[in-house]
Image (cartoon, rainbow, N blue to C red):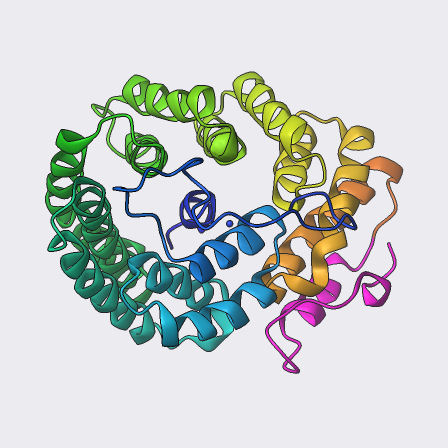
Amino acid sequence: MVTPYYLRAFMATALTLGVALPTLAADPFRSGTSPNASPMGSTTGEAFELMFKNSDYKGAEALLDTAEGSEADEPLLYTLQALLIYQNEDSKDWSELSTYAEKTESAAKALSRKGDDSSKLRGNLYLAMADFLDGAYAITKDGPVRGMSTAFGKLRGIYGSMKKARAINPDDPELNLVQGFLDMMVSNYLPLSDTKSAIKKLESVRETNPDAAYLANWALATGYRTMKKQDKALEAVNLGLADQPDHAELNYLKAQILEAEGKHSEAKPLFAKALRASATMPDNLVAQIFYEACKNEQSLDGTARACDPMRDAIRDDATDPWGPEVSALPQL
């Protein structure tokens, strides 16, 4: 199954937990948008930031439902809804991924027809995302063996649309973040792919766009970790946490990196910090974070724990798709 990290990091998906939110930008990628630009819809932009700055998937879902009535022409809206379907693995109704891929494609084509450069750029970007979602649907529906051939078959369409977008503005931060992470992910499967180019795109976002720097660092850290470059991954995740110190999933990622290096004491508080957002994250994600925290505790004190059944109780809770409050999590 395709890792959810790409979609979350792109769309990515915690600003300091417990601190009041600042005013949310209509477009989290572009500060000081020019009159001729085409930023994303404001409600979709808020949902994006709730999801990727606050790990508030629950609040984002409510905003996206609202946005469907007022921002039906925003392609990111449907990409984010696809992510929520993907995250809620218990549903198993993977056909909705295909539905949202079609809606993303339709909105992207309409955006491209507006004619201004920014609209055409974002239109092509989300045509690429529609192909990506189709590939993700194939893998979830048909499995990693059969589905992967379909997903790779989508690469020509993805990179064709990306090429058209880059011809308009190669420095656009939204484009570079998406393409950089895509390039890095593909390079893990295709040895001849250009990893250096992927890193360069993500670093350009980090260096030129403060609003999206944490997303670029999240993407870089995830990519380096997959590439087994732990030092580089730790450097990138630390930069991300310097911007967003209480970001739940960045803390989780750093905990994973440290745990893999045998630094269990350092990883422990980071797992706990990530779980502070348990009530607003999908229950399967909370269950996985909790499980890894439990295994880390076992490594620390050598005491066996019922990590598997405790994880399953969180993941299989049928009351709603979200995790429990922190106070309701099993005790380690």
Q: Judge left or right: residue 186 versus residue 62.
A: left
Magenta stretch contains residue 245:
no
Q: Judge left or right: residue 143 versus residue 287.
A: left
Q: Is residue 218 visible?
A: no
Q: Quadrant of the N terminus?
A: bottom left
* Numbered label tally: 0
For image coordinates 66% across by 44% down, the residue present is 15
Magenta stretch contains residue 315:
yes
For image coordinates 41% across by 21% down, the residue present is 203
Q: Is residue 109 above or below residue 232?
A: below
Magenta range is 305-332
Using the image as rendered, state which of residue 310 and residue 45 is in the foreground. 45
Using the image as rendered, state which of residue 207 and residue 229 is in the foreground. 207
For image coordinates 34% across by 19% down, the residue present is 200
* Residue 129 screen position, x and y as percent: 26, 51
* Residue 78 screen position, x and y as percent: 34, 64
Q: Quadrant of the C terminus?
A: bottom right
Specify the farthest residue to the bottom.
Answer: 319
* Residue 108 image-quadrant placement: bottom left
For image coordinates 59% across by 29% down, the residue present is 240
Using the image as rendered, state which of residue 302 and residue 8 is in the foreground. 8
* Residue 49 screen position, x and y as percent: 54, 51
* Residue 284 image-quadrant placement: bottom right
* Residue 245 screen position, x and y as percent: 71, 34
Q: Judge left or right: residue 63 versus residue 192.
A: right
Q: Is residue 39 visible?
A: yes
